[in-house]
C-alpha cells in the first residue's frame, strides 16, 4: 500500500519505527507516528508545531503514559518524586534505559509491527489524499488520518495538550492544498 | 506535568488508589536502583560484605538476592 506514499510520508513510516524502537515499544502506535510527523522538516510538521506540539514534549508524554503500571510516574509525583529527574540522573551515570525493567525483553533489532490503529491511520491517509485530490500521500495526509481515526495515545496527548483538532485539521488542509 | 498545587493535593490524598499506587511505584523504583547499584559495586570489585553493610542488610541477604543463578551480577571468578 506504500506505493502512493511520497518521500516524506515514507520517512514518517520509517521514522515511526525508529521512535518505537527508541522507546522500547513492542509495537508502532499512533504516538510513534505523531512523533515521526513532528520530526519532519515539512510545512505540515510546522503546522503541528504552531499548534503547540513539539517532539520532545510529546516524547515525554509518551514515556509518562506508557510507563508500566509498576513504575507509575504520576503516582510517584503524588509523593514528590520526579521520575523523569530520577531517570535522567540514573541514565547519565549508567546509560540509556538503565532504569528500565531488567526483565522486559530488549527491543528486537528487526521488524516492529504496527498496531491496528496505526495501520488504520495509514489507510485513512490514502483516503485523505484522495479527498483532497492529491495524487500522492504526503506526511500531512498521515496527520489528517491520525485526526480522522480520532483515538489512541496520540489523540490523548493532543487532547491533553489542548490542541484544537478541528482547527488543526483546517490548517493542515490549507497547507496541503497550497 | 502536574503543577505544585496538584502534587500537594495528591500527597495529602486519603484516596487509597493514589497512595497505594505511589507505594508500589516507589518499591519498584528502589528495586531497580538497588540492582543497578549492586551491579556497579560488584563491577568495581566491592565484596558482598561491603555492599551489605551500606545497604543495611546481611551479607547472606544481598548475596542470595543478587548472586544466585546466572546473570550479570554473578562473580566471574
Image: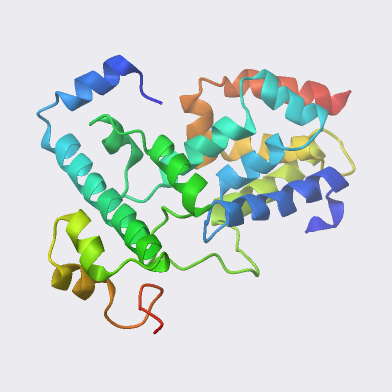
Nearest to the observer: residue A136 or residue B16: B16
Vertical arrangement, residue B19 with respect to residue A167, above or below: below
State which quadrant residue A125 falls in. top right
Q: Is residue A92 left or right of residue A70?
A: right
Q: Nearer the viewer, residue B31 or A37?
A: B31
Query: Where B13 sits versus B50, above or below?
Result: above
Q: How many marks?
A: 0
Residue at x-position 38% and y-position 59%: A101
Which colour style is shown? rainbow
- The answer to whether residue B56 is above or below residue A39 is below
Q: Position of residue A141 (x, y in %)?
A: 75, 38
Of residues B37 and A68, which is closer to you in this image?
B37
Identify the residue at horizontal 26%, vertical 46% (top origin). B25
**Quarter placement of the N terminus of chain A:** bottom right
**Residue farthest top in this picture:** B5
Task: Determine the image quadrant of residue B67.
Answer: bottom left
| Residue A3 position in % (x across, y down) | 85, 57
Q: Nearer the viewer, residue A111 or A9?
A: A111
Q: Residue at x 63, y 28 (%)?
A: A54
Quadrant containing the C terminus of chain A is top right
Residue found at x 69% / y 35%: A38
Answer with left or right where residue B37 lies relative to residue A19.
left
**Residue A69 visible at all:** yes
Residue A6 visible somewhere in the drawing: no
x, y (%) of residue A171? 73, 20
Q: Position of residue A26 (x, y in %)?
A: 52, 61
Amino acid at each position: 500500500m506504500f506505493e502512493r506514499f511520497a518521500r516524506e510520508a515514507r520517512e514518517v513510516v520509517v521514522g515511526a519505527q525508529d521512535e518505537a524502537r527508541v522507546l522500547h515499544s513492542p509495537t508502532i502506535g499512533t504516538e510513534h507516528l505523531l512523533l515521526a510527523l513532528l520530526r519532519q522538516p515539512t510545512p505540515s510538521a510546522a503546522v503541528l508545531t504552531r499548534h503547540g506540539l513539539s517532539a520532545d514534549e510529546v516524547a515525554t508524554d509518551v514515556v509518562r503514559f506508557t510507563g508500566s503500571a509498576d513504575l507509575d510516574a504520576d503516582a510517584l509525583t503524588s509523593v514528590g518524586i520526579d521520575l523523569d529527574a530520577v531517570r535522567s540522573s540514573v541514565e547519565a551515570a549508567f546509560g540509556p534505559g538503565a532504569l528500565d525493567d531488567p526483565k522486559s525483553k530488549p527491543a528486537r533489532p528487526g521488524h516492529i509491527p504496527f498496531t491496528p490503529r496505526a495501520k488504520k491511520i495509514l489507510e485513512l491517509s490514502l483516503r485523505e489524499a484522495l479527498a483532497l485530490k492529491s495524487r500522492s500521500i504526503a506526511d500531512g495526509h498521515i496527520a489528517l488520518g491520525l485526526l480522522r481515526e480520532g483515538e489512541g495515545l496520540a489523540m490523548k496527548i493532543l487532547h491533553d495538550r489542548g490542541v484544537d483538532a478541528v482547527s488543526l485539521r483546517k490548517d493542515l488542509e490549507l497547507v496541503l492544498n497550497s | 506535568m502536574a503543577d505544585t498545587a496538584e502534587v500537594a493535593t495528591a500527597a495529602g490524598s486519603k484516596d487509597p488508589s493514589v497512595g497505594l499506587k505511589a507505594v508500589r511505584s516507589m518499591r519498584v523504583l528502589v528495586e531497580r536502583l538497588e540492582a543497578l547499584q549492586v551491579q556497579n559495586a560488584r563491577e568495581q570489585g566491592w565484596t558482598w560484605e561491603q555492599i551489605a553493610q551500606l545497604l543495611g542488610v546481611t551479607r547472606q541477604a544481598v548475596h542470595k538476592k543478587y548472586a544466585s543463578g546466572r546473570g550479570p551480577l554473578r562473580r566471574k571468578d
